[in-house]
Image (tube, rainbow, N blue to C red):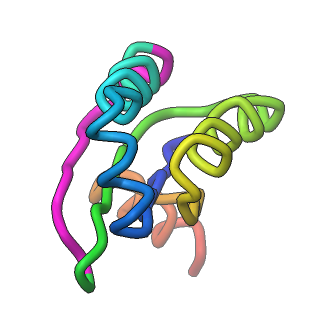
Amino acid sequence: MRFLLKVQMPVEAGNKSIADGSLPKLIESTLQKLKPEASYFFADNGKRTAYIFFSMDDASWIPQIAEPFFMGVNASVELIPVMNAEELREGLKKAF
């Protein structure tokens, strides 16, 4: 199943993790682990934010994905199931 991982971190924690080099390492290790379909990085409401779209079939991945962001950069983390246009079309066919 495809998910959106949304990560937002407080400015102070982000600044510290950039200065000590831990944020780039955390992002790189996450991208290597998840092998995302797409990833985007931007400021949202003044906070560093990442949207990472990836597939996950085993819920036991959730702590492995979220905890490094919680513990490393005091981030808020959301995992949201998402679908592409083809999946939406197929789902709508089955809904009615």
Residue at horizontal 28 percent and vertical 59 percent from the top: 85
- View extreme (right): residue: 60
Residue 10 is situated, as x and y percent measured from the top left of the image, at 43, 69
Residue 22 is situated, as x and y percent measured from the top left of the image, at 40, 29
> Where, by quadrant of the figure, is residue 68 drawn?
top right
Residue at horizontal 29 percent and vertical 32 percent from the top: 37
2 vs 60, left or right, is left
| Residue 21 drawn above or below residue 96 | above
Quadrant (top left, top right, bottom left, bottom right) of the N terminus: top right
Residue at horizontal 43 percent and vertical 36 percent from the top: 54
61 vs 53, left or right, is right
Quadrant (top left, top right, bottom left, bottom right) of the C terminus: bottom right
Residue 69 is situated, as x and y percent measured from the top left of the image, at 56, 45
**For residue 37: magenta?**
yes
**For residue 45: magenta?**
no
26 and 12: which is toward the camera: 12
Magenta residues? 33-44
26 and 34: which is toward the camera: 26
Residue 53 is situated, as x and y percent measured from the top left of the image, at 37, 44
> Where, by quadrant of the figure, is residue 26 drawn?
top left
| Residue 77 drawn above or below residue 2 | below
